[in-house]
Amino acid sequence: MYREPDVGFDPGSPGSRPGPKAGVILYKNLVRPLWSEVMIVQRVVLNSRPGVNGNPVAENFRVEEVNLPNNINEGQVQVRTLYLSVDPYMRCRMNEDTGTDYITPWQLSQVVDGGGIGIVEESKHLNFTKGDFVISFYWPWQTKVILDGNGLEKVDPQLVDGHLSYFLGAIGMPGLTSLIGIQEKGHITAGSNQTMVVSGAAGACGSLAGQIGHLMGCSRVVGICGTQEKCLLLTSELGFDAAVNYKKEKVAEQLRELCPAGVDVYFDNVGGDISDTVISQMNRNSHVILCGQISQYNKDVPYPPPLPPAVEAIQKERNITRERFLVLNYKDKFESGILQLSQWFKEGKLKIKETVMNGLENMGAAFQSMMTGGNIGKQIVCISEETSV
């Protein structure tokens, strides 16, 4: 699909006519127009690996220019990228071995991919026409790209009231992860006075999980996050009953005060010491929803990481369920889940937060920021805001 940039190619300014410095290759005695053959686009490739125990930095990625053919084959579509997603699971893809059987590693000097949404500029696939909005979980980090139409899904902007980036967050995989995780592993019964605790509560999944917990019947929801700003957001805007700043407060003491009846459901986004503390205060026959373990992603440990012996003893003695949860195993529930999330959003019952950076060149910075808690809600990168073709 990709060819390395031809030396001497200068696209010139938009709308300029081809001349010696605009849209040609110069050979010794030959001037050959290129306008009909290729266009230059930007992409992000994996520049280096942080190491299995290293912290990712923006410099692990680099931006380069490549040629994109101007013609597409049957079954393909050419799309312009609008929004790209950065997510904690991508840290595993930076390693040579992801440690899982369902995530493939990114390759050095190859284009990086993940969740993305864009607009169709040209189509030779029966399911798509020019102007359609399409989404993929394997979208190359590239300004424009030619993709196999079979790997794309058309989305309806009305489901998100025109906020297309929401398809990468609350009305997309993070929303489905939160909703289906709670439905399948939370065992919430409305009216039974259950208390839910959410770690990573101001992130893409956590900020939704707490709200969904309330919507499904939890009587009390407590969030754990890392700044006072986030704590205030949880309680003032997202309907959490209380919030704990783990960087400033003693989590165990705060949970005892804020969850006097113990913890019945724990939506775990972080793992590590925080989760050990929460599990130690969980009730008999309670449930851990194992969504993510971001505190462990920079460490070479199995997934899900084993609990310390003392905490594992508590888990077993109290019959606390803690099972690996993979949303991809519930694809039959995706369509109904998206409709439910969209309905709650349109009714004002589900508040959506996102942190947006602009420009493909900031993909690495956005990823580093997200991995260190710099985001509130879903971390998104806007590549292009032009939604017409």
Image: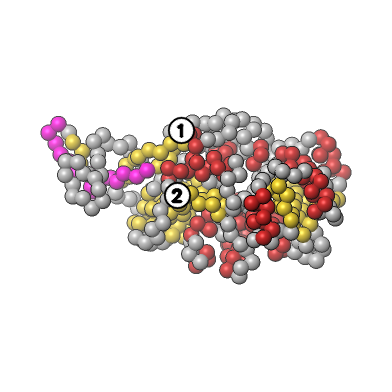
Q: Residue at x 68, y 43 (%)?
A: 270
Q: Is residue 38 above or below residue 234?
A: above
* Comparing labels 2 and 1, the label whose residue is closer to the camera: 2
Who is closer to the viewer here, 97 or 11?
A: 11
What is the x, y in percent for residue 325? 68, 48
Give the CA distance from mark 2 to mark 1: 21 Å
Residue 368 appears left or right of 281: left
Q: Residue furthest bottom?
A: 347
Residue 152 appears left or right of 313: left
Who is closer to the viewer here, 49 or 69?
A: 49
Q: Where does label 1 land, which residue?
A: 47
Q: Which residues are magenta?
A: 28-42
Q: Where does label 2 land, which residue?
A: 358
Residue 60 visible at all:
yes
Judge the density around disc 1: few (<14), some (14-19), many (≥20) Cα neighbours within 10 Å: some
Lower sequence index among marks 2 and 1: 1
Q: Secondary structure at mark 2?
A: strand
Q: Residue at x 46, y 48 (%)?
A: 139
